[in-house]
Image: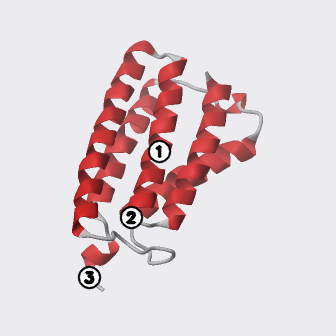
Amino acid sequence: MGFFDVVNVCGLLFVAIMIVPHIVYARTHNYDMKSVENRAMVYIERIGKYCGAFLMAINIGVLEKGFTSDLMKRFWLYSTAVLVAAYIVLWILFFKTNKKGFAYILTILAGFILMYCGLLQVKTLLLTAGIVYMSGELYVVKKML
């Protein structure tokens, strides 16, 4: 089993691009996680986020079938690139306006990207992580804004 059988380089790149705005936001804005009363939802959100990032970048071989064809792999690559570009544009708009609507759209889009990649790559755990992330993040965003 080679390096590229385990590491999904494109998935790793997409994850890195999606995490950068979170890091920038955390460094430039002060927010209090204590405003969220239900700590379990915060942990659910974090578990979904980090498991989704890990599973998008690393092929663990459990409940995975991979792409059904080369055409599906190309389709995944191009469509996910477009979705990640839209995600970055929405982050830029959110940084400028700081509106609640953009925060919800960002949450839904990030969860959709994880679930979409899980569906196209036939990765059941990635699909599940996307669902867990979206449900936890929607709750946290609602309480934080």
Q: Quadrant of the N terminus?
A: bottom left
The first of marks 2 and 1 along the sequence is: 1
The correct choice, above or below, for 37 with respect to 122 in the image is above
Q: Secondary structure at mark 3?
A: loop
Instruction: Give 113 or 141, whichever is nearer the viewer.
Output: 113
Q: Position of residue 143 (x, y in %)?
A: 68, 27
31 in relation to 70, above or below:
above
Q: Is residue 4 above or below residue 14?
A: below
Q: Which element type, helix, strand or loop, lies under badge 1?
A: helix
- Disc number for residue 96: none
Percent x, y for residue 31?
A: 58, 26
Q: CA distance from mark 2 to mark 1?
A: 14 Å
Nearer to us: label 2 or label 3: 2
Q: Of tags 1 and 3, which is closer to the observer?
A: 1
**37 w.r.t. 131: above or below:** above
Q: Within the image, what quadrant is residue 110 found in?
A: top left
What residue is shown with label 1?
A: 112
Callout 3: 10 Å neighbours few (<14), some, many (20+)?
few
Residue type, numbered disc 1: Phe
- Dot placed on the residue nearer the N-terminal end, 2 or 3: 3
Mark 2 residue type: Gln
Q: Position of residue 79 (x, y in %)?
A: 29, 47
Q: What is the x, y in percent for residue 118?
A: 45, 59
Q: Amino acid at mark 3?
A: Gly
Disc 2: which residue = 121
At a point 30% along the width and 55% down the height, the residue shown is: 76
